[in-house]
Amino acid sequence: MNNIYRQLQKHLDKLPVGFPPTKSGVEIDILKILFSKIEAKIALCLSLNDSSIKKIQKRMEKKFGKKMTFNKLEKMLDKLFMEGSINRNVKKNKKYYSNAMLVIGMFEFHVDNLSKTFVEKMHQYLDEGFKDEYFKSELPQLRTSPHIDAVAEQHKIETYDNMIKYVKNTNKNIYVANCVCKQGAELLGEPCKRVDNIEVCLMFNQNNYVERNQARKITKKNALKFLIMLKKAG
């Protein structure tokens, strides 16, 4: 049974932020949490690029010798998307699916649906191998956004880093969601000491979170109030 998960590990390891093996095999434990055996086979037929259901259906038949009906495959793909294990994109009322990276990706997509076991396995994986993979990536996964008076006046703060100016000027939809890191820490007995309400993550045009009922839309005015509140909270 582990063979299909090892295949999936190697498959996901080819993504820009990989999924490296460890001596303990904790990465296999994580995949078993995220995918059933048949779901792992489906994930093996996805890639970083969007694929239609028909294309995934053909890959399944070619790779595993069995053809899954269009409706059944669509249902399973949508289930994987709703559970946060893959990506989904809708173009002109047609669905497309792709593999999600572990971080930023599958872990964050499990906000509001974390288990203590999953968080513990993620911490173990970070210590044993994933942390090195994450930070060696040429893709900037995270970027600190300082508030204006945290930087001396002689330093110019670009628009990208000036979140208040960004919010004022953006035409994108603004959403707020719970912080998956704070949720995970609380499951491990380390609740956030800065804020009581962990709904502290701003996002822009992230419709996937809305489809999963993981985020709510807020006005630009409320987003600015939100940033000021977070600044005061530290």
Image (tube, rainbow, N blue to C red):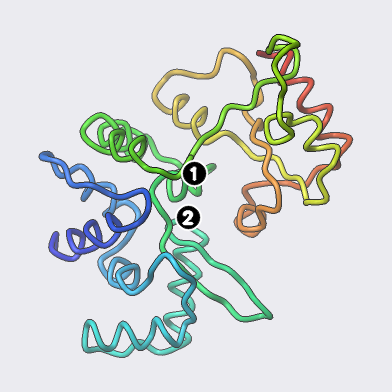
User: Residue drawn 77% across and 20% down?
Assistant: 229
Report x, y in % for residue 151: 68, 13
Q: Is residue 36 left or right of residue 193?
A: left
- Quarter holding the N terminus is bottom left
Instruction: Name which of mark 2 and mark 1 comes first in the sequence.
Output: 2
Q: Is residue 100 above or below residue 62?
A: above
Q: Which mark is residue 84?
A: 2
Q: Choose top left, top right, bottom left or bottom right for residue 224.
A: top right
Kind of residue at disc 2 = Gly
> Percent x, y for residue 108?
49, 44
The secondary structure type at the circle numbered 2 is loop
Name the residue located 19 percent from the left edge and 64 percent from the top edge. 7
- Residue 115 placement: quadrant: top left
Marks 2 and 1, Cα distance to the nearest angstrom? 8 Å
Residue 160's place in the image compared with 147, above or below, is below
Q: Looking at the picture, how far across and down is residue 183, in whole percent?
A: 51, 31
Q: Is residue 191 above or below residue 133?
A: above
Question: Residues at badges 2 and 1 in contact (C-beta under 8 Å)?
Answer: yes
Residue 165 or 212: which is nearer the viewer? Answer: 165
Q: Residue at x 73, y 29 (%)?
A: 162
Where is residue 150? Give x, y as percent.
69, 12
Label 1's element? helix
Which residue of the protein is positioned furthest toward the front in this rendering?
154
Return the residue at label 1. Answer: 108
